[in-house]
Image: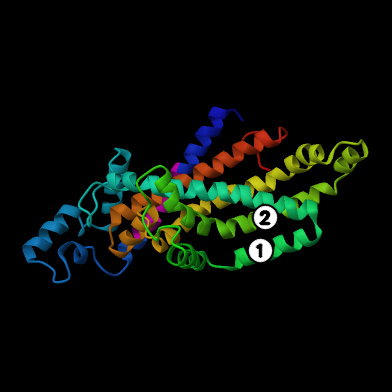
Amino acid sequence: MSLSSYILRRAGGLALVLLVTSFVVFGLLYLAPGSPLAFVLGPRGGTPEQIAAVTAQYHLDDPLFVRYFSWLGDIVRGDLGNSIVYRQGVSDLIVSRLGTTAALVGLSTLMIAVIGIGLGLIAALKGGWADQIVNVVATLGLSTPVFVVGIALISVFSVGLGWFPTNGSGSGGLDTLHHLLLPAVALAVASAAYLARITRASVLEETGREHVQTAVARGLSGSVTVRRHVLRNALIPITTVMGLTVATLIAGAVVIENVFALDGLGSLLVRAIMQRDFAVVQAVILVLVIAFVVVNAIVDFLYTLIDPRISLGSKQ
């Protein structure tokens, strides 16, 4: 499959996923109890004239399908709508918070790749006590909920030692890195532990294959054998897990952003759901779905670079 055909097929799949996801989320929000009027007009409500004006402005009395297709038409024209609660454009809300979530996920991904693959290689190649220690650490990481890790990190390194701030995303540059380091660690712990287990299993499987034994018999050094014959062949399952991990990090960021009071897409999504801010919920979920599909498309493309026998768009 050519690159252009692959991109077109992926774009068509993305459009279908977005259409189905947007309708399901829109329908669930529409059927959920409560009304956004309570958040717009306050707990005491408003006068009948105010209620009628807000209802007409946001088309809250329109049937589900009318509101959905009206919203869908605005999306096609590039208009994400206006937030009922924040009283500003949804695009501005997302753009102002996208950088925080992207930086958090990117930093966590780097930690997961380095720590997960590194520990997996150590466990598989060293064996013995090193393998046992890595297995224990990985089990602890997998069994500890992400919010528990976050709270523990805040208690020790922020409150106890005072090395890191307890909230906020900083003012840019190194200050942002300083603020996001603990949240990134909390977000990366479970995924790094899982990747370490997958890397260990994949490397152990490859070391027992005939071509690896042949390379050793030919007198190739251990580092060359691992790099050319073991790690490269083990990269397919490792890359698959990395792709799924990055995609799930986007959803996992919702919890971490609330634990560390970060002003990102995750915290925005939680507040919008609580306040029945339909336009914001729809837009943020669309962004998350797009990110998920794009990450999986990148993983499929990486398969062809790792193993030339895999053609673009083929089924592995």
Q: Name the mark on residue 201.
A: none
Q: Name the mark on residue 137.
A: 1
Q: Are marks 1 and 2 in contact (CB under 8 Å)?
A: yes
Q: Name the residue: 11% across, 57% down.
A: 53
Is the residue 223 above or below the residue 118 in the image?
above
* Pointer 2 residue: 196
Q: Which x, y percent locates residue 271?
A: 32, 61
> Dot 1, crowdedness within 10 Å: few (<14), some or many (≥20)?
some
Q: Which x, y percent locates residue 255?
A: 44, 62
Colour option used? rainbow
Instruction: Answer with left or right where residue 219 lies relative to residue 25.
Output: right
The amino acid marked with disc number 2 is Ala
Is the residue 229 above or below the residue 137 in the image?
above
Instruction: Answer with left or right where residue 13 lies relative to residue 307.
Output: left
Q: Which x, y percent locates residue 115?
A: 63, 51
Q: Nearer the viewer, residue 192 or 60?
A: 192
**The C terminus: image quadrant:** top right
Q: Name the residue: 40% across, 47% down.
A: 175
Q: Specify whether residue 146 is painted magenta.
A: no
